[in-house]
Amino acid sequence: MNTTELEHVRGVWERTKNDSPIYRLLLPDVDIISATRGQMQARLKLTAEHVNSRGTIHGAVSAAIIDWGGACASIDIHVSYLSTATVGNTLDISAVADRVGKSMAFTTVKISRVIDDQVGPLVSKGSHTKFLPVSKENREPKS
């Protein structure tokens, strides 16, 4: 039985979340709303656990979302904090695999506030370079 890309990504997220204390702590209520090859979109409603002492989204939460949206093993991550969000705001998370090579992937993740059920102002964005571990069994033979 074939699963859709969305079902597959949701299944991977459930397994990952169960194995990751930090994701269970910061991102337990992420809702993946769409997924296609190389792209994913999700939503997260901010709670008191996501904000800093000023009541706005904590930078570590934005960084964790960008890390999560890029998947695999991080080599480099860059986060730009452009705006803010508060408790009760819903965030839209858009992740794109810009390039996937044999051992490296380059991803972009955008975090925006949702206003009237539409993607609104950008809160933060990040670029993420990932190492793609490839087992010896899955390597293509050299010509």
Image: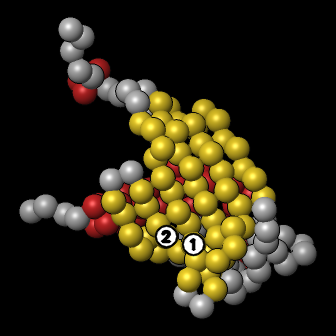
With respect to residue 61, does 80 lie above or below?
above
Label 2 is placed on what type of residue?
Ala
Examine the rendering and report whether any part of residue 73 can be seen. no
How busy is the neighbourhood of tag 2: few (under 14 within 10 Å), some, or many (20 plus)? some
| Quarter containing the C terminus | top left
At numbered mark 2, what does the secondary structure look like: helix, strand or loop? strand
Which residue, given by chain and number where applicable, does mark 2 sit on? 42
Q: Are marks 2 and 1 in contact (CB under 8 Å)?
A: yes
Q: Residue furthest top?
A: 143
Along the line of sight, the residue nearer the viewer: 14 or 7: 7
How busy is the neighbourhood of tag 1: few (under 14 within 10 Å), some, or many (20 plus)? many
Can you give x and y, in whole percent of width and height, for residue 28 in the image?
54, 71
Residue at left offset 57%, top offset 37%:
129
Which residue, given by chain and number where applicable, does mark 1 sit on? 92
Can you give x and y, in whole percent of width and height, for residue 66 in the image?
61, 54
Left or right, 2 with reference to 34: left
At numbered mark 1, what does the secondary structure look like: helix, strand or loop? strand
Residue at left offset 58%, top offset 77%:
119
Residue at left offset 27%, top offset 22%:
139
Left or right, 130 with reference to 65: left
Q: Quadrant of residue 23?
A: bottom right
With respect to residue 113, does 70 lie above or below?
above
Instruction: Pick whichever of labels 2 and 1 is earlier in the sequence.
Output: 2
Along the line of sight, the residue nearer the viewer: 20 or 61: 61
| Quarter containing the N terminus | bottom left
Per the model, the C-alpha gap separating discs 2 and 1 is: 6 Å
Can you give x and y, in whole percent of width and height, for residue 87 in the image?
74, 83
Left or right, 102 with reference to 76: left
Label 1 is placed on what type of residue?
Asp
Q: Quadrant of residue 50?
A: bottom right
